[in-house]
Image (tube, coloured by chain):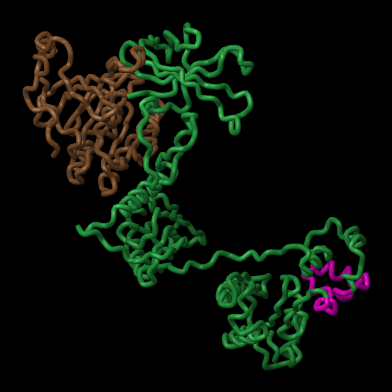
Chain colours: A green, B brown
Amino acid sequence: MNRAAEEAGARIGARAVDSRAICPALRIEQAEPEQDAARLARLAFWARRWGPWSTPDGDDGILIDTTGTAHLFGGEAAMLARIQAHFARAGLTAKLALAPTRGTAWALARFGPERAICTDPLPALAPLPVAGLRLSDETQLLLRRLGLKTIGDLAAIPRLSLMRRFARAGAQDNPLIRLDQALGRAAEPLDAPEPAPEFAAEARLAEPVVDPSDWLPELLERLCAQLAAADRGCRRLCLSVFRIDGERRDIRVSMAAPTREAAHLLRLFDGRSERLDPGYGFDLIRLAAEAVEPLTTAQPGLDGAAPSGLALARLVDRLAARFGPTAISRPLPHESHIPERAEIPGPPLAAIPAPPARADRPIRLLSPAEEIRVLYVIPEGPPAQFIWRRQTLRVARHAGPERIAPEWWRDRPGTRLRDYFRIEDDTGLRLWIYREGLIHDGRGGAPRWFLHGIFA
Amino acid sequence: MSARPFPIGVAPFGRAPVPVVPSLTAPILSEAFGTRPLTGAAPGFVLATLPPGRVLWVQDRLSRTEFGAPFLPGMGRDLLRLDLTRPADVLAALEDGLQSRALAAVVGEIHGHAPALSFTASRRLALRAEAAGLPCWLIRHAARPEASAARMRWRLAPLPSASDPDDPYAPGDPLWLAELFRARGQPPSTWLVRHDRAADRLDFSAPAGDRKLAEPRRKAG
């Protein structure tokens, strides 16, 4: 309801026929709450020109976090005037208020003076009615019956009695919580939705289809052209299909390095669109670039080929898209004597060179180590014979022991030390075995033996 | 093409002549079969032949659980490891790897008899390896050789190692019996291969034993 209708005598909550009797020129539109909410969400994104974060607030408000942006528009008062002018140009009436807390801004925008700017919440809020605290109708009624008409009255009451009265109530019904939020004593952060994708390409189809792959090349071309025009590359692509039954399905592919190469991106979707559940079909396909990063045009090498770092990133992309990002890794050395901690899976594009090979370390490591049964053993030496999976192996040669103590800063108390032996059996199998613990070390019974690695 | 390390007819100390060793870094598909459980002969042989550079190393699940995963401190190579489940995935990953210019070689490990590794699949890999100019190795654990388009097929068996100069009781440099049982343009031959770890080099020599006695037996079999 705009101001002209208000001056003509129409009131919110009155019946439409009564209002039309008072003001025959009144134009009445049907309420469309869902569309209003969608429009408000779009408007909230549009309002991000005045602050980095904004979100729809309830069904009739927009919250903008303008911290540190007012000077860009010539001060706070000038900014509010300019915002109002912008909304007026869009045909919208806006009531504005600027305050240090969300609750105060809410109250001042609805019950305060025009374009209120507040620096200290309590004096500004004191004369306003308790409805300015975003309370439910029942609580407002209760407070009115208690004789508490303004926020100032409420703030004057000792906290203890308020707390006792409204101990179990949620934020909607609890004047104390709302008062604390408005006065900045309780935090109330702004929960802004994700920004809309900056680069996206859409295809609207006349008929529902179940396979998006025919439209993918064209969408990718358009998206990559947008990215190229802005000198950007993306590290994630989201393909969304909007099904006719109101559902949405997404496929995401990630890239190791920013890219805008349509042919490469198309290959990443190979075999992925088959796993999409199309339902009864979809009529809108959207391809959005996420994680957009600056990407300047790379100069090809003298032989005309792409740089080799790029080739590796492309390979990692393809393997990760096909087998999942966890399957691919690059083993990196790690400072630890415990063999299974001496290498850690690193990111595939890590540029740390591999250490030189050590002759006393196996080329294969069994994970977990397999327990072997030792028949008899020389004290402090390797077993002369042991059984692995019902096969008896006779030790012909050995080197060791190499004692590796547990890492006390990391392992559980009671972890036993390991004595490693490089052994070779009489047929030439070269293995790495260890004894866990010592006799009478006070950390368990008899020592156990394990097979841990295989030498070349 | 690298020069052949051993020209024809060099017979140290009057022993049987060493058969010509084919180029191990040629851009072809080769297969290396292990002969028994717990042996690291096939992976060790393949590792020693790989050219310097980054290597894509793909394993299926059974190879990983039965024969262990590549261990960086012992290998000392730049690896790009891919841990997969099915042999068919291993083959697909190898094909992807062969299309990239960022790698020096591609190695896949497949455990047991895999229906996915048919003659057609091996032919695909062989053609791609030749087109890409990259050596591609398939390490076959616990498998019998079947029809394959691999240009070289090796069988690697472990032998008691060479003696360690410092410690007579310790295992020294690895020693393998390498049998090239199928190769294009090359008669099947057998070598005694020693991996000189200090120089990271493979020394091929004629296998010990009387070849005159050994040859008729092979013909009969």
Taking the magenta stretch, the answer to whether it contains residue A139 is yes
Question: Height in image: A122 above or below A385?
Answer: below
Taking the magenta stretch, the answer to whether it contains residue A186 is no
Looking at the picture, tell me which residue is in the foreground, A311 or A361.
A361
Q: Quadrant of the C terminus of chain A?
A: top left
Residue A234 position within the rendered picture, expressed as x and y whole percent measured from the top left? 41, 61
Q: Main secondary structure of the magenta part?
A: helix
Question: Height in image: B89 above or below A449?
Answer: below
Task: Tell which residue pokes out farthest to the front in this image.
Answer: B166
Residue A283 in view (yes/no): no
Q: Is residue B194 left or right of residue A294?
A: left
**Residue positioned 80% across, 78% down in the render:** A124
Looking at the picture, tell me which residue is in the foreground, B24 or A40.
B24
Residue A152 position within the rendered picture, expressed as x and y whole percent measured from the top left? 87, 74
Q: Quadrant of the N terminus of chain A?
A: bottom right
Residue A17 position within the rendered picture, expressed as x and y whole percent measured from the top left? 73, 85
Looking at the picture, tell me which residue is in the foreground, B194 or A136.
B194
| Rendered image quadrant of residue B43 | top left
**Residue positioned 63% across, 26% down in the render:** A413
Q: Is residue A377 left or right of residue B113?
A: right
Tell me which segment is drawn in magenta: A123-152
Looking at the picture, tell me which residue is in the foreground, B26 or B94.
B26
Q: Is residue A125 left or right of residue A450?
A: right
| Rendered image quadrant of residue A129 | bottom right
